[in-house]
Image (spheres, helix red, strand yellow):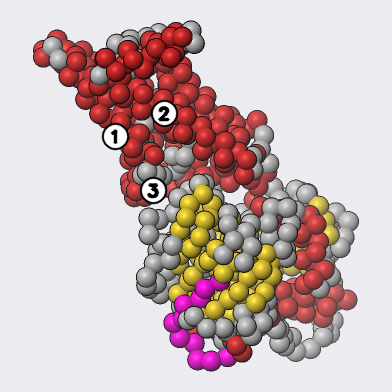
């Protein structure tokens, strides 16, 4: 119920955001008509259309993106015709002739004097809903993200409808006020024709703004600067944001947290073990590790967790890896099973695709470690990498309590990992984790900005500042990933770190994608990562994190570039070490 209220409030706040500006001219174009027969049907059909399109967007694939683009084009045509008919009555008559021949009463009315009934308003509401669908704030992002994690369902559609109804509520209030304003202007000035022409100009300006992508570019950025802070405060109150951390966020003793007995029951699958419960584990010391297999911070903690499991399993330690996905491909059981095999993980792994275990622990981070005593109480917790000696001392403390002072294996584990699991050089990591999908993208430098969910021909900027990145070639940038729509596409990043990693996936149908990496325009040589050779060549064969650069030379600012020789690659996020 709380999420429904948040969705409704998020929709209400939409009227305060410049993101709604492209919709207003089309809505107010009928503000001089009776609200019950014109404004209300338009708004209701707009809300239903928006909820339907957004629901389909959750479940569809690339074909739906294309269909949505066609829908937007059709909506633009409708509104362009509406704007022209508002400007010139003579043109309206000429444009109406083909529709009259087809017997379309709605379009005949739409192209006449601006009047019309409920049917016309419903039609215009459908078109407005198609245009409004890309206008999303943080709360709508939460709804779509939740659907991606849990699968599309009726609950998601109802949440989207609640969001749309919230926006309709505020638009209805504005439209009712607009009706009174128009009536007053007519009475005092007698300028109905002038008003119609102004509305026609506004409609055409709105069409041009939407066609040029301003509704999803400049206006979206403005909306984030205005209302998203209010929405985000609502979200943070009820739904804290998760994040991956590379350094310690908390390394202190927890206050004897009592977990529900069902804390592990939300797992969607188990690997290396039958399903386990906290009741079954009473009398054992339990280490819960929240991780996900494409998270570089999680990968770098794995060697220590595996070493603790091997060292203390005979003394009563049970390690459980809770795999809570960040990206959609990490929800696939076969992907996680392969990652577990490849990484050599021997202890039980619970798949937490619905975030049920995550929620039971009130967790917010990858990686996160919870140390549970024999009574099932969380005694210690640690978020992020580092402080491994202290974590092992906590394990020893809880085991000594369990075993009544019985001798434990001595010393502290010594780990020397290689590849992506090797410890980072934090003194030289000056570049942050950077997402390529528009939902969390920052420091994007290609001219024109990101075009959301639409194929676009990008080019690299002439110069990249530190931590700036760009695309070249035809890409479709989605909320969490960018997909290359043609061969020879590129991604460039100006970074400062020893290691550079990129989370990648092959084509949608699993075909491998070849790539070539350069540093400052040259082959990496001995500075290549484990997933490239000295000439910078490599192949994307599966969804995972790829280590592309590991510098042997002194760490300085460098421009990294990767060129994909084949189309269809999926790029998710950069990480550094």
Q: Secondary structure at mark 3?
A: loop
Is residue 555 found inside the magenta-colored segment of the image? Answer: yes
Relative side of 537 to 35, left or right: right
Which of 204/101 is in front?
A: 101
Neighbourhood count class around disc 3 (C-alpha, 10 Å): few under 14, some 14–19, many 20 upward:
some
Q: Taking 314 as reference, is 55 above or below it? A: above
Question: At 75% from the left edge and 89% from the top edge, which residue is drawn?
Answer: 411
Relative side of 539 to 172, left or right: right
- Which of the labelled discs sits on residue 217, or is there none? 3
Residue at which label 2 appears: 77
Quick one: label 1 or label 3, which is nearer the N terminus? 1
* Separation of residues labelled 2 and 1 (CA atoms): 13 Å
Q: Secondary structure at mark 1?
A: helix
Where on the picture, by quarter, is residue 405? bottom right
Is residue 215 found inside the magenta-colored segment of the image? Answer: no
* Separation of residues labelled 1 and 3 (CA atoms): 16 Å
What's drawn in magenta, residue-wise? 552-562
Q: Tell me residue 481's x, y (percent).
A: 57, 55
Residue at which label 1 appears: 205
Q: Taking 317 as reference, is 186 above or below it? A: above
Which of 522/348 is in front?
A: 522
């Amino acid at each position: 119920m709380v999420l429904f209220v948040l969705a409704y409030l998020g929709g209400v706040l939409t009227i305060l955001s410049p993101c709604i500006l492209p919709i207003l001219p089309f809505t107010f174009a009928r503000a001089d008509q009776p609200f019950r027969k014109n404004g209300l049907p338009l708004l209701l059909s707009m809300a239903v259309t928006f909820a339907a399109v957004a629901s389909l967007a959750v479940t569809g694939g690339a074909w739906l993106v294309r269909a949505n683009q066609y829908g937007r084009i059709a909506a633009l045509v409708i509104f362009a015709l509406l704007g022209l008919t508002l400007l010139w009555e003579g043109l309206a008559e000429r444009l109406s002739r083909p529709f009259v021949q087809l017997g379309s009463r709605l379009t005949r009315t739409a192209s006449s004097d601006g009047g019309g009934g409920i049917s016309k308003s419903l039609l215009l509401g459908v078109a407005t809903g198609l245009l409004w669908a890309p206008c999303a704030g943080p709360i709508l992002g939460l709804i779509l993200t939740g659907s991606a994690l849990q699968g599309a369902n009726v609950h998601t559609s109802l949440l989207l409808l609640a969001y749309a109804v919230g926006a309709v509520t505020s638009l209805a209030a504005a439209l009712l006020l607009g009706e009174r304003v128009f009536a007053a202007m007519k009475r005092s000035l007698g300028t109905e024709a002038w008003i119609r022409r102004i509305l026609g100009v506004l409609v055409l300006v709105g069409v041009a703004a939407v066609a040029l992508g301003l509704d999803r570019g400049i206006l979206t950025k403005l909306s984030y600067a205005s209302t998203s802070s209010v929405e985000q405060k609502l979200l943070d109150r009820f739904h804290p944001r998760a994040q991956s951390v590379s350094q310690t966020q908390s390394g202190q003793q927890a206050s004897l947290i009592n977990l529900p007995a069902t804390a592990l029951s939300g797992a969607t699958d188990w690997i290396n073990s039958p399903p386990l419960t906290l009741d079954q584990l009473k009398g054992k010391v339990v280490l819960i590790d929240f991780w996900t297999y494409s998270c570089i911070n999680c990968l770098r903690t794995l060697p220590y967790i595996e070493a603790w499991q091997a060292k203390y399993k005979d003394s009563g330690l049970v390690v459980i890896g809770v795999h809570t996905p960040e990206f959609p491909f990490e929800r696939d059981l076969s992907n996680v099973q392969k990652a577990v095999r490849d990484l050599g993980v021997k202890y039980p792994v619970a798949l937490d695709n619905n975030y049920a275990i995550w929620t039971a622990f009130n967790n917010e981070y990858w990686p996160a470690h919870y140390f549970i005593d024999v009574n099932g109480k969380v005694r210690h917790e640690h978020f992020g990498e580092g402080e491994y000696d202290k974590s092992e001392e906590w394990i020893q403390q809880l085991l000594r309590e369990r075993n009544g002072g019985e001798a434990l294996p001595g010393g502290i584990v010594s780990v020397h990992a290689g590849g992506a699991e090797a410890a980072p050089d934090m003194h030289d990591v000056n570049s942050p984790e950077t997402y390529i999908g528009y939902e969390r993208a920052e420091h994007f430098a290609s001219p024109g900005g990101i075009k959301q969910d639409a194929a676009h021909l990008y080019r690299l900027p002439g110069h990249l500042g530190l931590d700036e990145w760009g695309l070249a070639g035809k890409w479709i940038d989605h909320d969490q990933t960018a997909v290359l729509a043609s061969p020879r596409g590129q991604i460039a990043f100006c970074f400062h770190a020893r290691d550079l990693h990129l989370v990648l996936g092959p084509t949608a149908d699993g075909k491998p994608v070849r790539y070539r990496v350069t540093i400052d325009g040259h082959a990496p040589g001995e500075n290549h990562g484990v997933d490239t050779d000295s000439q910078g060549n490599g192949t994307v064969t599966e969804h995972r994190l790829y280590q592309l650069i590991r510098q042997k030379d002194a760490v300085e600012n460098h421009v990294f570039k990767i060129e994909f020789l084949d189309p269809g690659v999926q790029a998710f996020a950069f990480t550094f070490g």
